[in-house]
Amino acid sequence: MLEQLLIFTRGGLILWSSCRGLGNALKGSPIDALIRSCLLEERSAETSFAHDAYTLKWAFHNELGLVFVAVYQRILHLLYVDDLLAAVRREFAEIYDPKRTSYDDFDETFRQLQKEAEARAEEMKKSKQAGRAPAVPGKKQGAGGAAQRDAKQKGNGAGGGGSGKDDGDGDGDSGKGRWLANGNGNGQEKGARERSHAPPGSVVVKGKENGGPQAGAFDVNKLQKLRSKGGKKSDNTKPASKGGEPKKIVKKNRVWDDSPSESRLDFTDPVDERGEGIVEAVAADQGESMMDKEEDLSSESEAEEEDEEVEGAKPGAKKKGWFTSMFQSIAGNAIIEKSDLQPALKALKDRLMTKNVAEEIAEKLCESVAASLEGKKLGSFTRISSTVQTAMEEALLRILTPKRSIDILREVHAAKEHGKPYVIVFVGVNGVGKSTNLAKVAYWLLQHNISVMLAACDTFRSGAVEQLRTHARRLQIPIFEKGYEKDPAVVAREAIQEASRNKSDVVLVDTAGRMQDNEPLMRALSKLINLNSPDLVLFVGEALVGNDAVDQLSKFNQKLADLSTVPNARLIDGILLTKFDTIDDKVGAALSMVYISGAPVMFVGCGQSYTDLKKLNVKSIVKTLLK
Amino acid sequence: MSMCMDQWISQIEQWFHQQPVEQIYVAVAVLALTVVLFVLFSLLKTSKSNTIVLAGLNGSGKTILFYQLRDGSPHQGTVTSMEPNDGTFVLHSELGKKGKIKPVHLVDVPGHSRLKPKLDEFLPNAAGLIFVVDALDFLPNCRPAAEYLYDILTKSSVVKRRIPVLILCNKTDKVTAHSKEFIRKQLEKEIDKLRTSRNAISTADISDEFMLGVPGEPFTLEQCRNKVTVAEASGLTGEVSQVEQFIREHVKP
Ligand SMILES: Nc1nc2c(ncn2[C@@H]2O[C@H](COP(=O)(O)OP(=O)(O)OP(=O)(O)O)[C@@H](O)[C@H]2O)c(=O)[nH]1
Ligand SMILES: [Mg+2]
């Protein structure tokens, strides 16, 4: 049975609920969980969301700003939910009035709709059982019906996703669910990845769960009879013009940091190690860490924005698109359809990909933006491409805005009050600059009068301990090391104990770089994290990576979850992006990593000296991504 | 194309010459006057803003409060907001009153941290800000609430225009709710700590943030340049008189 069907505005007001009186009887408010960890995380193009014992499915009506959510027990595989949601969405849109807040009269309609949907599901089951051979004529009929129905839907200004990739128009076989925002996912991926970003106890399911290709094969005549009201509106929306591809603005290479690096930080070279005497203590003479300086980017990017606007106003290169869309915007508020969005989204996706955003993520983002725009009215004097651009800008800003506090100093102070050292574990694949950036973080902390201790837990790669020792000497901070033979988890534990004894405020734990597929090493990392429960697990990743960013982070998170021996495994809390000075405007890795892990970028490493550590300027990243 | 244009222009010129001179002067004068009046009017309108912003963490009860103020009822409850609620209306409690009452523009900005940047859109013309705190579930949310409040109190758009802030302890219908004095103390304490850590992070960050309070002294809300007050309410049961008082203090009826 369906537990609850809820209709609410995007502003959060419940308009109608299938089970009133009992109030919010659902345990653990699954709907809030859905909104917080799925819909607001640009994952609304997914098919369903699982929370505790419930599965949730949803549909949007973007023009009216309504959300429809159905909740049912996870163990039941209700086949009619998509169908029912679509029907409720259609019927409710007819009676919706923004001024009204109570819809008691919808109870009756809903009961009727539910009965119909159940009947259809029953029908389908029977026809499936009856064998496939005689289903051929029925199927034909079904195909016609589906197409008809589809047209009706369009007339109603239907919104929602659908894959749009392989759904031919009017092709009845593609079945139902096309008008649902979460109708078709691209079902190639497995739920494995989703584990990494969903909150504990929640899983996002991709791909179609119910309604196979047969779904369109129910008896349409019966449907027509059952239904007293038909769709009244006809399909009168003209195909809108294609929003011209936004012109790319050729820009000079961005320079992130123009001060020459004074000293190399890379001590990997064993030669360095021998010249111990030469290495002088430079703890205090490299000036302020850049973490403390405001990005000087903002003014520059503002100027760029103006340029862009000027260019945008010139119709020149894209006269045709401009003309038709102009005509449309005067002629009336056209309703945005999926097909209108495609060209603009395609251009946007390509643009994101040239900025080195992983393809999969660019794709998902575009789907989510499409789901949020489809069915909306186009404002007068706006082009589709600019509407899409604005929606994407908002989505990006939302994603990149940290969910948790990234004020590490505050957390360090809080830990200090409790008399405990604050422990940060640096993890990541090989050669991304873990140790170097660990030293930068140490330098930055030292500048704020916080005592730091290093823990050399890379007992795997030779030379790693020496490299860290060199940093420690230059920064004049204690280092805890136990050579190469020991279990890193144990070394870390002893280091933390030592830090409690000598009253260090922060312990920075260096770990061995490891490939995300290396099972034994990942198991060791999981053990280290579980044994010591650090305050922060910082993933160190290169800003250079493209598609691999997704693989690295999602596998790290997944392995940490799978290989953990405790029920609530610790995952990655934050990201440190390295080599940011080498990537120009290809800042996509920041987006990919944040999206896939849900963790914020806490630091950005942007050079070779101790001071080259910055905060991420979210607004300028968004601007750069969309330029 | 241009030929056509020229013809038009010459025609218009001719027409002008045919008209008496006084008439043209009068027309120009009337035109200028209306423009000036229009500009003045719109200037006056923007300078007297009637926007009140509701901000606060997720689940603190902003949306319920919004509807309580508008309709006098929490309706059937709420779920997490995905978009701001925005409306211009006369408060529900004032509906019975006679005479013309100036409507209030009330905005409820969702508390989900990903949606916090939305706040900046509404602050530039806010006449007041209500920071809603969940008094029932206060302790676990104390630090994030203080951080959000700190961010608001240091925003240049708030400090420069001295936007008055009301810290509203909501959900006081429940007996286990914390008192406003307690909440005030805790928030002040947390902000005091934040002051040291935040200032450390952004020493060169004068551009859009302001220093809070007096250096060397423990932070109290009185030290803010804008007026910060504390009040209690319950959105669910409709105990919102102190909120209405605040609103009407800053948006005159
Ligand atoms: N007991 C009690 N509960 C309340 C009160 N106000 C709100 N609540 C409850 O708090 C929950 C959240 O209320 P909302 O108004 O949706 O919270 P919000 O601040 O809009 O949250 P976001 O939209 O996520 O930012 C709801 O379940 C309300 O029933 C109150 O005065 N008393
Ligand atoms: Mg809300």
Image (spheres, coloured by chain):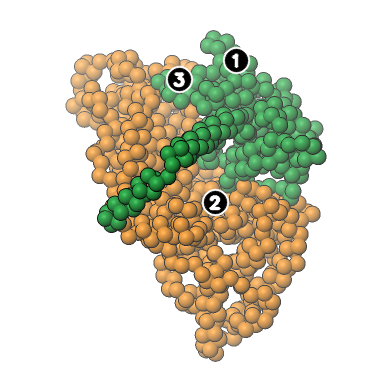
Chain colours: A orange, B green
Q: Residues within 10 Å of mark 3 (few under 14, many from 20)?
A: some
Which mark, residue A39?
2
Which mark, residue A507?
none
User: Between marks 1 and 3, how big is the CA–CA gap?
Assistant: 20 Å
Q: Choose top left, top right, bottom left or bottom right for residue A506.
A: top left
Q: Tell me the mark number nearer the camera, choosing from 2 and 1.
A: 1
Q: Nearer the viewer, residue B90 or A502?
A: B90
Residue drawn where x is 72% and y is 26% of the image: B231
Give the letter of the chain under mark 2. A
Residue drawn where x is 65% and y is 41% of the image: B88
Q: Residues within 10 Å of mark 2 (few under 14, many from 20)?
A: some
Element under disc 2: helix
User: Between marks 2 and 1, how big is the CA–CA gap?
Assistant: 40 Å
Residue drawn where x is 60% and y is 81% of the image: A220
Report which residue position mark 1 lands on: B223
Query: Could you tell me the amino acid type at mark 3?
Result: Ala
Query: Could you tell me the amino acid type at mark 1?
Result: Gln
Q: Tell me the mark number nearer the camera, choosing from 1 and 3.
A: 1
Element under disc 1: helix
Residue drawn where x is 71% and y is 42% of the image: B70
Report which residue position mark 3 lands on: B200
Q: Nearer the viewer, residue A323 or B140?
A: A323
> Horizontal and vertical percent for residue A405?
51, 32
Element under disc 3: helix
The N terminus of chain B - image quarter:
bottom left
User: Of marks 1 and 3, which one's residue comes earlier in the chain?
Assistant: 3
Give the letter of the chain under mark 1. B
Give the letter of the chain under mark 3. B
- Eyeballing the image, is B216 above or below A288? above
